[in-house]
Amino acid sequence: MKAVIRRTGAGTWDRFAASDPGLLRLMAGLRTVSAIVLTLIVLALLGTPVPLMVAGAMTAMVSTFAIREKEVRGQAGTLALGLPVALAAVGLGALLHSRILAGDLFFIALIFGAAYARRFGDRGTALGLIGFQLYFISLFVHATVATLPPLCLVLAIAFGCSAVVRFALVPDTPERTLSRLREAFRARLAQLVATHRELVDAGPEELDGVLDDLRRHTARLHETALMIQGRLEEGTRDAATAALLQRRIADAEIAAERLGMTLLNARSAERTDTLTLHLPHAPVPATANRMHSEGDAVTTLRRDLDALGLLVGRRAPGDRGTALAHVRNRLLGYREEDNLPRGSAAVQDTFRALGEAARAVLGLRIALDGPQDESDDTSATARSREEIDAEDLSITGAEPDEEEDGPTGLARPTTRAAFQVTAGSALAIVGGEFLSTQRWYWAVLTCWVVFLNTASTGEVLVKGYRRLLGTVLGVVAGVALAGLVGNHTWTAFALVLLCVFGMFFTAPLSYALMSFFVTAMLGLLYTLLNTYSVATLVLRIEETALGAACGIIAAALVLPVHTDRRTDEHLGAVLDRLREAVSASVTQLSGGPAEDLLTRARDLDTALNDLRGSTQPLVHPITPLRVRRQTARYLVALLETCAYHARSLAATAELLPASRSVAADPRLARAGRRIARNIDLITARVNDRPAEGEVEAGASIASLLEADGSPVPPSHTVTFRVLRHLQRLDEGVVGIARALDVPVAGRAGRKKG
């Protein structure tokens, strides 16, 4: 019974860890709530009035969530600088309380400075946010010169409590965060393998649902890999350790995605396009499951997929034992042709992919958990360990890239955003005063927040819509909660804490849901300040709508960045990174010098993630242009497919120095040149540069090599796998050209919707 409870608890925790990689949302919510609780306890012991307790709670919240730096030393420095900034903002707010015009002009100047400070990185962003939010708090609690001394003391207490929570009660270091992210990667990998198992037996009526799960879990695994990439520099002791972990994470991700593709191929009479894994509702060649005719091979496949899930999910130090070693040895044995079960070529490919996935998991476990038990190794397992050890010796830390000079002046995004949010806030102040001389600052706050983490008119529009939707729903909840708590002060504070936790836990998932918790919390805060009324919350909706409208107007008229232009900029960056990654990989596969290829592949992934974010206004359900929405989704899916093949090529090319199964082939350079030239032509079209020629399509990569008098290698070889990746890349690039109406040789370009 204890074992069952332990396994159930471990499984539940794994699912939670997979849903919140690195527990980043949980830690953010706990840290903020703990800072507020500690502040309230200290202030209550000092007999502080409720309005000042509200100010202290809000200050503790701001001083906690504003700081985003990863290093503990940087966090401490920003928190120390934040207190004088907060005192200055509140002091000026109190001094200008009765000077309406001067107060408004200072608020506008403060907004510009806070937005412009983002150009100075995480510290500038945090200090600007603290300055803006603390001035807002001074307006919210109606700070005056008479209340300034106790208010400053409350601010100092709130900052102190925030520091105690951050560095003592709920500490978080880059190493701990990276460790939790690694466990999240393991949990998400286990979820993906479980979906692979479901795919084996899914019937025609279940296939669409399983494919949706497969796409979602594949994307979530990739998301976690990118999050780990962003934490490697701070979370590891040296560059070599970071490079090793990066390699093992990439191997596991690529092997898992390849396993999914081989399973889809084994189900169908035709080869499945890789696009199936990246494009929602992409058609599959056939819904009939051909694996049901494979007999014993499919029974073995089911068993071994379960075994792979066990191998992924089990953790050291409880992994020693004959049973687990037997599972590991059997899976690694599929890397040798003699051990493959009888079956069709597609099913045998699946077992090869299983063997490669088991090897990737072994390498991942060694990187994460240290040396493994080798007492029960078979010859196949020993060979895999030798390969992994040889690769580890060849991995070196990459030198950090020099930062490229970005745009200057008004072309710099932070400068442009500063002017836009300032213009929008000025409109919001004027309009807000007409709606309410007491609550006008809600319109300004909405205008401010819709510009946070947005960079185009479309993004501001979507964020404003989500803010308004969340506010409307939050008002309903606020009315209900205010009626529930009545005059019970500590009940109201407890519900405020729940709303704060909900805000930070849901913020990365849904901006509308976060806005709902914000507005519900405000209803409770007004109750605590004895200023609650239904009319006040209705005014909140009106001010929010006004602020969103002012933000949209400013984004459209003041130094506008249209969504199409921003999308084209990101698309050009993705194509540049794709060309660099593919060219460098093919060069190394052709016998050229070794490079840090996985870093190039991750740069491509980062650029693609930026593009995906910039296309959100185009693919949002409220977008009326349906054809453009479908085209944007199709184009992003094509690029995701190309990025997968680029990652696979990079991982294979990096095996060259240490592998006996991968050899350089100079003939590949010809295929690489064709793909690079095609990408250059597309990039020129996207960037409105003149370019001569047409994108080449037609002859397959294999036929290009046959033209040199050499036969196509057998399908089970690594060389053949390289050719398949190049072929899929070539087809994907031609598909991108057609989607963008770039001329394709021998066939009129056509736009696919």
Image: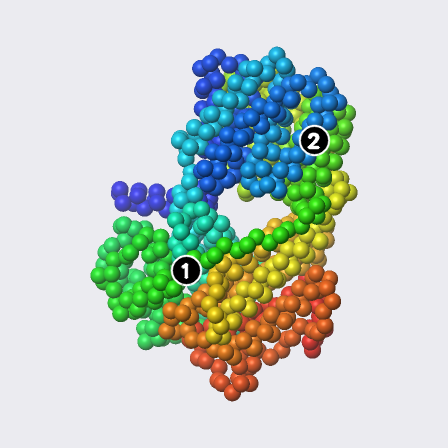
The residues bearing labels 1 and 2 have C-alpha atoms spaced at a distance of 49 Å
Residue 109's tag is 2
Identify the secondary structure beneath mark 1.
Answer: loop
**Is 501 on the left-hand or right-hand side of 95?**
left
Q: Quadrant of residue 738?
A: bottom right
| Place of residue 241 in the rendered image (x, y in percent of width and height, measured from the top left) | 39, 54
Label 1: few (<14), some (14–19) or many (≥20) C-alpha neighbours in 10 Å: some
Mark 1–mark 2 contact, CB under 8 Å? no
- Identified at 68% across, 42% down, the residue is 415
Among numbered discs 1 and 2, the one appearing first in the sequence: 2
Which residue is tagged 1?
A: 396
- Identified at 71% across, 30% down, the residue is 108
- Identified at 35% across, 55% down, the residue is 367
240 relative to 465, above or below = below
336 relative to 27, above or below = below
Identify the secondary structure beneath mark 2.
Answer: helix
**Residue 480 seen in the figure:** no
| Place of residue 301 in the rendered image (x, y in percent of width and height, measured from the top left) | 37, 65
**Is 505 on the left-hand or right-hand side of 408?**
left
